Structure formats: C-alpha cells, structure tokens
Amino acid sequence: MTPVLVINSGSSSFKYQLLDMDSERTLASGLVERIGDPMGVARHTVYATPTDGPSPAFLDATRTRELPIPDHTAGFGVMLEAFASDGPSLAETPPVAVGHRVVHGGARFFEPTLITPLVEINIDELSVLAPLHNPANLAGIVAARAAFPDVPHVAVFDTAFHQTLSPAAYTYAIDAEVAASHRIRRYGFHGTSHKFVSEAAAAFLGRPLAELRQIVFHLGNGASVTAIDGGRSVDTSMGFTPLEGLVMGTRSGDIDPAVLFQLERRAGMTVDDLDELLNKRSGLLGLAGSNDLRDIRAAIERGEERAILAFEVYVHRLRAYAGAYLAQLGGADVISFTAGVGENAPHVRAGALETLGFAGVEIDPARNESRERGIRIISTDASAVTVLVVPTDEELEIARQTLSVARA
C-alpha cells in the first residue's frame, strides 16, 4: 500500500482524502469546518469498498462530531484523532507524502513543487493575487507539516496547467508597464481538473494525448472552459482571477469594465461593493435568484421568465466560448463536460452544443440523458467530434502529482 494524503484547505475549513496509490482508491475522506467559530464540525468517512477514482463509493462508516476547533492546527489534531479512532490507522500505514491544493502559483510555479520554507514564503507573497485563497492554503500547509513532519509535502497549483499559454493568450491589452508592475495577466484556474479530464479522455478513447485537440468544460458553481492542444492548455476562460469567463453560480463572468465605472459614478458603489456584486450577487443567482440549476430548471418548467432568461444567458456564453476555442484549435477531436453541472445536467450539455453541427458535433439524446455514471460517450457514432462526460477527480490528480515529486 502507498498512502498519499491530499489536503484542500480553506480559510475556515479543510477537506482531506487518503488514497492508496497502488490501486488509486480512496481509503477515507473528511471535512473539518467552522474553524474559529465557537463550535466546529468534523466529518470522517471510511470506505469499506474503497472508491475507484470518481466511481460511487460504498461507505463503511461516517462519523460527525461537533467540538471547538480554534485554528487549523487544532483541526489537524481532530483529523488525526478521527483516523486513530475510526481508521484507517495512520500509525500502521502512514502517508508517504502529503499533497496540497494551492490556488495561485502566479508565473513562478508551473509544476508540482516540493514545499520548503522558501516555497511557503512564495505562496504567502502570491497572496496579493489570491487574497481569499492562498493564505488559507498556506495555513493548511503549516498545520499539515507540523502534523506530518517526516514526510514530503507537495504543492499542486490550480494555475500551473495554464503556464503553457502563449503571450498572445495571456496578455491583456493595457499599458504594458502597469501590467508588468502589478503582474496583471491571464493565469487561468481549475487547471488540476482540466489536466485530469483531458488525460482521462485520451486514455478512455485509447488515443495519444499528443494528437488530440480538446475542449473541456468544467461546470460547477465556479465554471471554466479550456482549449487543450496535445495535452497543453492554449486558452482558458478564467483570467487574472476566477471571475472572468463563463456565467457562474454567483459570479458574472465576462462584463464590460465600463459597467463598473458607471456603477461607481452613478450608483455610488465602492470597490468593495463592486467586488461583492460581481463575485457574490451575480451569475445565475443575480439573474434568477438561485445559483442552483436544478431550481432554475424547475422554475423554467413553471414558465418563470426570469429563470428562462438566466438559462439562455448561461448557455449563450457556453456556445460563445465553444465557438471561439474551435477557432483557436482549428477544430476539435474531443469535447468533455465535467464537475457538478457538467456531469449531471444533460440539458446544459445539449444547449451548449446545439448549434455546433457545422463543426461535426452530434449529440445522441438517449446517451446524453442516460443516468449512467462514470466516463461515457454522449455523441452519436457518426459525430466527427467525440463528446464525453468525464467525472473529474482533482484529489486523485493531486495525489498522482504529489507521488511523482516524492519519488523524484
């Protein structure tokens, strides 16, 4: 057995997953949340029949506890207690490495990186580009290194996969000196997922990754789409921050920057007001009153015009990016959908590709509506472009990259 522990740390919570990399199966997972509140919550799940990647899990036991968790260090203590009491025993099979999701690697980190004190300093310094994420990621790293001082810790960056973007793709057309001084450029996000899905698609089809032109839609509450040529990201919808691009659950996606000037001048909105508006009160929530597409679909069936418009705007943006990336790639061999919406909303998939018949895209309605789980084809046999649903597994991808660094 080769256990690898994966940590995804937020400001007041962290998720963890223990995987056996010999079989790439999940042994246990958990969530520690409400860190710093008067009462925190910790959930720990052990798998009787370990999961095989993203396939359905057979649960042995899930235990939930409520207790004070003042900081991340205390949270890791709670996690260790859960492993000791509920299993699997880390004393008997300790992790050979710990992998950490880090949102922003800037232009410095383009591959999984062994964490050293200098790397921690760099992650902290890059917090200026991701003030809501990198400090929380770093807090998890510090606590985890204290809990597991004798094993390698590896940072896997959401932005790293997009470091292959060309200057033409990542450069914004603003004053070059201003951009350079403040590191303003397209970075892209969800890179771990886009990498996993594009490689899984190639493996599933039995085709060399280097020969495939792929478009991957990662559609969840946060959403992005990436054009991938030969396994390399060549364009992606998220930019300097995860706000740019597609319409998302609560984020606006693309918007004319002058709208912000108008709201500041005419509505008296502050920078903080605008930040909250675009990140927390826009997207599907702003248009339809809900950021859950299941609610929106139910409202559409009731004939609510607000919900109908929200869905049309959402799909319009998906089609626009699909068309743009077909042009950037010179056509596509594979289009994949992943994440919560991408994997579970056939009406979104159908709507996104409805007008792409000119590019050889044909969806099979029965395959698209199927409730089958796992990776699957939803295009017709005659389609020139293979369309897939590919369940993402970012934890497995982080574990793979972590193990490769630990063994180097």
Image (tube, rainbow, N blue to C red):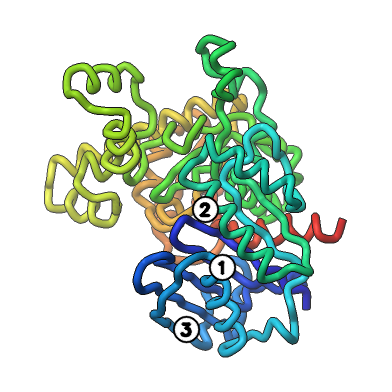
Distance between mark 3 and mark 2 Cα atoms: 26 Å
Residue 208 location (% of width, % of height)? 76, 45
Label 3 amino acid? Thr
Say which of marks 3 and 1 sits in front.
1
Distance between mark 1 and mark 2 Cα atoms: 12 Å
Q: Is residue 275 above or below residue 144?
A: above
Q: Marks 2 and 1: in contact by CB < 8 Å?
A: no
Q: Of label 3 and label 2, which has the lower sequence position?
A: 3
Residue 258 location (% of width, % of height)? 31, 16
Q: Of label 1 and label 2, which has the lower sequence position?
A: 1
276 or 401, nearer to the observer: 276
| Label drawn at residue 136 | 2
**Residue found at the far right of this picture:** 408
Dot 2, crowdedness within 10 Å: few (<14), some or many (≥20)? many
Q: Quadrant of residue 319?
A: top left
Residue 173 location (% of width, % of height)? 52, 13
Q: At x 51% / y 63%, what residue is drawn?
A: 14
Dot 1, crowdedness within 10 Å: few (<14), some or many (≥20)? many
Would you name the residue on which mark 3 appears? 62
Would you name the residue on which mark 1 appears? 73
Say which element carries label 2: helix
